[in-house]
Image (cartoon, rainbow, N blue to C red):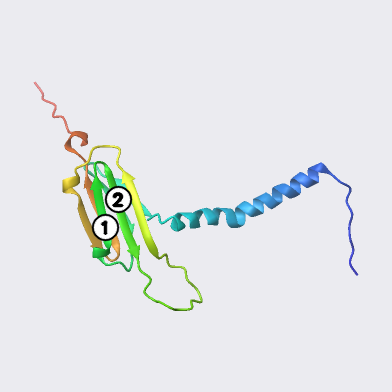
Amino acid sequence: MVVFRRHRFSPFREFEDMRRRMDRCFDRGFVRSIERRWSERGCLPVDVYSTPGAFVVRANVPGVDPEGVNVTIEGRTLTIKVNLPDLEQDVDYSLRERELGEYERTLSFNVPIQPEAVEATFENGVLTLTVPKAEEVKAKKIEIKTG
């Protein structure tokens, strides 16, 4: 036996139901879909921090040969391009979560840099770029002379 309850129409109840449905929408799928869109756009995730003399940029590029990474610098703009290869062809996956494909990231620095002195290292699938700041923006210690 099925029991149906009938409620009188109440605009407040309708608004409360709508609010609950919207909360569920945002809690479940909306935020995750934004995260997915970053990878769908081919954006390479990076970490950037600043030291007194340089910017340090790190990017995880597992499974990529260092020759497969292209780093260019033009003015104050740094671009990293990488292609994460699909090693298995014609495979029917049961689960596939690894990010594959072409990725690119362009960073613009807000202070002058020294493009000719940029250093790049590649270790254990992590690309590290050290981008020195130009001399005019580095902090200088002023000696105080006493009498």
* Residue annotated with mark 2: 79
Indicate the secondary structure of the residue bearing disc 1.
strand
State the residue lying farthest toward the left: 147
Q: Residue at x 24, y 61 (%)?
A: 122
Q: 58 or 97, which is in the foreground? A: 97
Residue 90 picture location, percent across and down: 43, 78
Q: 103 or 120, which is in the foreground? A: 103
Q: What is the count of numbered marks?
A: 2
Residue 9 picture location, percent across and down: 86, 46
Q: Is residue 61 visible to the viewer in this orientation of the structure? A: no
Indicate the secondary structure of the residue bearing disc 2.
strand
The amino acid marked with disc number 2 is Thr
Quadrant of the snapshot with the N terminus: bottom right
Q: Is residue 43 above or below residue 85?
A: above
Q: Is residue 93 left or right of residue 135?
A: right
Which is more N-terminal, label 2 or label 1?
1
Q: Residue at x 84, y 44 (%)?
A: 10
Q: Residues within 10 Å of mark 2 (few under 14, many from 20)?
A: some
* Residue annotated with mark 1: 70
Quarter of image, res 113: top left
Q: Is residue 72 above or below residue 101?
A: above
Residue 35 picture location, percent across and down: 49, 55
